[in-house]
Amino acid sequence: MRISLQLPVFKFPGGTPAIAPTLKTVAQTADAGGFYSLWVMDHFFQLGMGLGPDEDPMLEGYSTLSFMAGLTERVMLGTLVTGVIYRYPAVLVKTVTTLDVLSGGRAYLGIGAAWYEHEAKSLGIPYPSTRERFEMLEDALRLAHQMWQGDRTAFDGAHVHAEQPISSPQPLSQPHPPILIGGMGERKTLRPAAQYADAVNFFGRAGAETLQQKLSVLREHCDALGRDFDAIEKTTLNTVHIAPGEMSAADVIALCREQASLGFTHAIFNMPNVHEITPVETMVKEVIPAVAGI
């Protein structure tokens, strides 16, 4: 089982001057220790939901990934996930391509339909209806595949129209950076995931029964489309607090085994005390070796 690290919080002891050196230490520890990938959210201020208030520090996702790309050698890098409303799709493809080329072929394209209306309206970002956002998502997925195939013919989608979608250089990843779709909607998210994605991400906190149901629906969509269900990487996002009186390495290993038994092959974790580095080192020394063979 692959083990990865998400960094959704940048409020570290020492304030703003501590952000860059803390990220450097975390990224390099994860890279050297066998984590498969590093992820950041693609948001512009903090989300609440236990992560912190709006005014807490939040870094722009692709700048942060580029910073970490220069500090690491092995880990994959991606957003979990980019809202399709935030960037013109062709520009997003170019951004991910640049990350892939400069990291030596280590980029994911993490993408979803966007959901955080408060953030969008606060920053003056248009926030279309649910129907339109999912149409935009399908446009972006189709355009990414076209551009990464080197096809420069005019693209005409429901919302995106590109006269000559040039992508040069092409990514180092072959056939292209893996596309991960985040979300658990059975019709609007999992159907395009079955058609276009190389990976999906579900919230681990949803519980075993719900996760199993979502995988079953994804399989049904794959069958209907003639897509190989096993060709899609199944990932989960989990929060673990490794500390005395909280969770132990054994607890995390048990969680990994449970999710692997459902059919997941890649567990992504965030940790509220990641800045202490000790939790990252515990994952490296105890969790990653224990689940490598699952």
Image: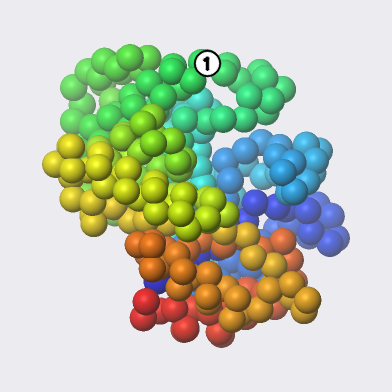
Dividing the picture into quadrants, the one containing residue 222 is: top left
Please tell me which residue lies in front, 287 or 210.
Answer: 210
Residue 42, percent from left and from top: 57, 41
Left or right, residue 98 beside residue 154: right
Question: Which colour scheme appears in the figure?
Answer: rainbow
Dividing the picture into quadrants, the one containing residue 7 is: bottom right
Question: How packed is label 1: few (under 14 Cα within 10 Å), some, or many (20 or more)?
Answer: few
| Pointer 1 residue | 128
Which residue lies at the image location 35% right of the left edge and 38% below the top edge? 190
Q: Amino acid at mark 1?
A: Pro
Residue 93, percent from left and from top: 38, 36
Residue 226, percent from left and from top: 14, 41
Q: Secondary structure at mark 1?
A: loop
Residue farthest to the front, as pictured? 209
Left or right, residue 236 beside residue 193: right
Quadrant location, the N terminus:
bottom left
Which residue lies at the image location 18% right of the left edge and 22% below the top edge? 153
From where the camera sits, is residue 138 visible?
yes
Which residue lies at the image location 70% right of the left edge and 52% below the top edge? 9
From where the camera sits, is residue 277 visible?
no
Residue 78, percent from left and from top: 47, 51
Quadrant location, the C terminus:
bottom left
Q: Is residue 186 above or below residue 232?
A: above
Q: Is residue 24 above or below residue 170?
A: below
Residue farthest to the left, as pictured? 226
Which residue lies at the image location 85% right of the left edge and 60% below the top edge? 14
Residue farthest to the right, as pictured? 14
Counting the numbered discs, the total is 1
Left or right, residue 133 beside residue 169: right
